[in-house]
């Protein structure tokens, strides 16, 4: 079973505005409301390609109800801890550039956190767990690390995608794959990465700390994969009209893990991962299976070493 953990989910409002100006009245065009949060995005992508998963995390209030309702409509299983307050709303505004305004959810209490940890007791070595995004108010770094430790102790496959501190703090639990983007990887080590060689140098440092595979997304330049066997693969990206890059990285990670588990082939997993990231970039919300398959002929994987 695949499980996704989104400790701080959101409702994403996607909208556009022409001639946007700070300090003045701006009118947006039609808005789309989609459920968000890294783990939830992963569950939706998995569902879109026919892979069963269950979404875990915290939800609250009218926005939490919207998240559960939308996942029900999509056919995505979920088992959230319900808390007081309201789940956050994020705005993704497209003008001449993309601007993100992320809200803040209400906090969780100790009982909520305890209820969440109880859910982890069902995990076995047959399961895959995506631990994604940041902690919610009321939880801390130690809680995030404790989740990773519980997953690892159960024998389940751990996948981590979060901010630099949380990724680095969970490497000791040997995640199957971590997926920083090029900027985030440099940020982890306080450097600016200017070449493939430098990206691989610091990807290897993540492996030295415990990561088995490192997938580094590079935007329009595609992605690099450093495998646990020290093989290096490079993949391009598909061409198309970008609607929103929100959830593109989550889609790439979800597809990579699912396709690798199906084929045990890193190159095939990477090819599908790039197509999935593109499909989401060209869609409102998370890309679907049909578009992923349409983009596959554009994707080429090269072995660098």
Image (spheres, helix red, strand yellow):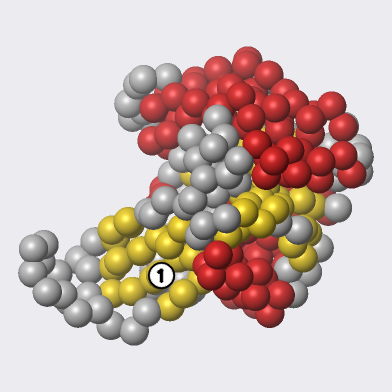
Query: On the rendered structure, is 59 left or right of 74?
Result: left
Can the viewer see residue 62? yes
Q: List the residue tagged with mark 1.
A: 13
Q: Nearer the viewer, residue 304 or 250?
A: 250
Q: Residue at x 40, y 70 (%)?
A: 13
Quarter where residue 28 is shown? bottom left
Q: Position of residue 26 (x, y in %)?
A: 16, 75
Q: Residue at x 37, y 79 (%)?
A: 31
Q: Position of residue 86 (x, y in %)?
A: 50, 60
Q: Position of residue 54 (x, y in %)?
A: 77, 58
Query: On the rendered structure, is 23 left or right of 44?
Result: left
Q: Residue at x 75, y 44 (%)?
A: 115
Quarter where residue 120 is shown? top right
For label 1, the crowd category at 10 Å Cα-Cα, with few meaning under 14, some 14 to 19 and many 20 or more, is some
In the displayed image of the protein, which residue is found farthest to the top? 208
Residue 47, placed above or below residue 194 = below
In the displayed image of the protein, which residue is found farthest to the bottom? 30
Q: Nearer the viewer, residue 173 or 111?
A: 111
Q: Position of residue 160 (x, y in %)?
A: 63, 37
Query: On the rendered structure, is 220 left or right of 82?
Result: left
Q: Nearer the viewer, residue 283 or 100?
A: 100
Q: Residue at x 52, y 45 (%)?
A: 107
Query: On the rendered structure, is 122 left or right of 216?
Result: right
Q: Label 1's element?
A: strand
Q: Quadrant of the C terminus?
A: top right
């Amino acid at each position: 079973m695949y499980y996704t953990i989104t400790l701080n989910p959101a409702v994403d409002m996607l909208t556009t505005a022409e001639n946007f100006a700070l300090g003045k009245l701006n009118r947006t065009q039609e808005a789309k409301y989609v459920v968000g949060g890294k783990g939830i995005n992963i569950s939706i992508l998995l569902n879109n390609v026919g892979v069963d998963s269950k979404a875990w995390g915290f939800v609250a209030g009218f926005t939490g109800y919207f998240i559960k309702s939308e996942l029900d409509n999509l056919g995505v299983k979920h088992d959230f801890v319900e808390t007081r307050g309201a789940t956050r709303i994020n705005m993704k505004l497209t003008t001449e550039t993309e601007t993100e305004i992320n809200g803040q959810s209400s906090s969780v209490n100790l009982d909520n956190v305890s209820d969440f940890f109880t859910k982890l007791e069902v995990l076995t070595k047959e399961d895959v767990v995506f631990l994604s995004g940041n902690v919610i108010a009321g939880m801390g770094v130690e809680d995030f690390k404790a989740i990773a430790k519980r997953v690892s102790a159960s024998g389940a496959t751990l996948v981590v995608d979060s901010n630099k501190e949380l990724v680095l703090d969970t490497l000791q639990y040997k995640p199957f794959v971590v997926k920083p983007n090029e900027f985030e990887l440099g940020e982890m080590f306080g450097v600016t990465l200017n070449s493939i060689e430098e990206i691989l140098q610091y990807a290897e440092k993540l492996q030295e700390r415990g990561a088995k595979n490192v997938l580094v997304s590079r935007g329009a330049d595609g992605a690099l994969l450093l495998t646990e066997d020290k093989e290096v693969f490079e993949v391009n990206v598909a061409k198309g009209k970008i609607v929103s890059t929100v959830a593109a990285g989550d889609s790439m990670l979800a597809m990579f893990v699912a396709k690798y588990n199906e084929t045990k082939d890193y190159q095939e997993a990477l090819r599908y991962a790039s197509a999935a990231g593109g499909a989401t970039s060209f869609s409102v919300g998370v890309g679907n299976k049909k578009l992923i398959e349409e983009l596959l002929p554009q994707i080429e994987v090269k072995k660098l070493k």
